[in-house]
Image: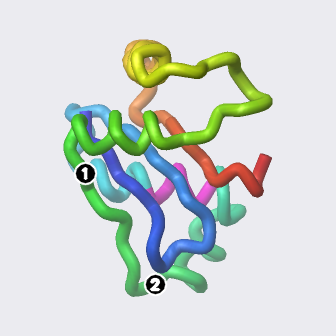
Amino acid sequence: MKYYVFKNNYEYYALIAVSDSEEYPMDVAIKKYAEEIEGGMEEYNESYEFDSPTEITEEEAVEEYKKANFEGFIEIKTDEEKIKEFYKDINEQKNDKCKLLLIDGSLL
């Protein structure tokens, strides 16, 4: 898996996992972000033409997941529970080319 975090210059935070089998994984992550958050590629390109998400390691992705506040959405309290949920989400993604793992809470 490849992991991409959208933050810093991005209005809304997101963590997206993309299958290693994808030839252009960053493009897949950007398309997912554009569709799920921006309303499409045209809107994404207008806002972030010269920006790119940051590729991070699996360990960094786990740390991002552990920092997330799931309060009110799912009953996860401990880091161990969050790690377990992270890998559960990844395993559920096997048939898809990418998975939106975390999203800015203001969008929910």
Q: What is the spatial separation of the Cα atoms under label 1 and label 2, in whole angstroms?
A: 21 Å
Coordinates of residue 34 in the picture (x, y in percent): 58, 61
Coordinates of residue 98 in the picture (x, y in percent): 43, 36
Q: Quadrant of residue 12?
A: bottom right
**Which secondary structure, mark 1?**
strand
Q: Can you identify the residue that label 1 sits on?
A: 56
For label 2, the crowd category at 10 Å Cα-Cα, with few meaning under 14, some 14 to 19 and many 20 or more, is: few
Identity, as a three-letter code, of the amino acid under mark 2: Glu
Answer above or below: position of 85 versus 97: above
Q: Nearer the viewer, residue 59 or 3?
A: 59
Answer above or below: position of 47 versus 95: below
Q: Quadrant of residue 5?
A: bottom left
Residue 77 as seen in the image, left or right of residue 25: right
| Residue 9's disc number | none
Q: Residue at x 38, y 38 (%)?
A: 17
Residue 31 as seen in the image, left or right of residue 27: right
Coordinates of residue 47 in the picture (x, y in percent): 58, 83
Q: Can you identify the residue that label 2 sits on?
A: 49
Residue 104 as seen in the image, left or right of residue 26: right
**Mark 1 or 2: the one toward you:** 1
Task: Tell me how many marks there are.
Answer: 2
Q: Main secondary structure of the magenta part?
A: helix
Q: Residue at x 26, y 56 (%)?
A: 55
Q: If you read the primary sequence from the N terminus, does the residue marked by circle 1 or circle 2 appear first?
A: 2
**Which secondary structure, mark 2?**
loop
Residue 6 as seen in the image, left or right of residue 106: left
Q: Quadrant of residue 71?
A: top right
Answer above or below: position of 60 versus 52: above
Identity, as a three-letter code, of the amino acid under mark 1: Ile
Q: Nearer the viewer, residue 84 or 108?
A: 84
Q: Which quadrant would the N terminus be assigned to in this image?
A: top left
Q: For the magenta stretch, what is the residue range? A: 30-35
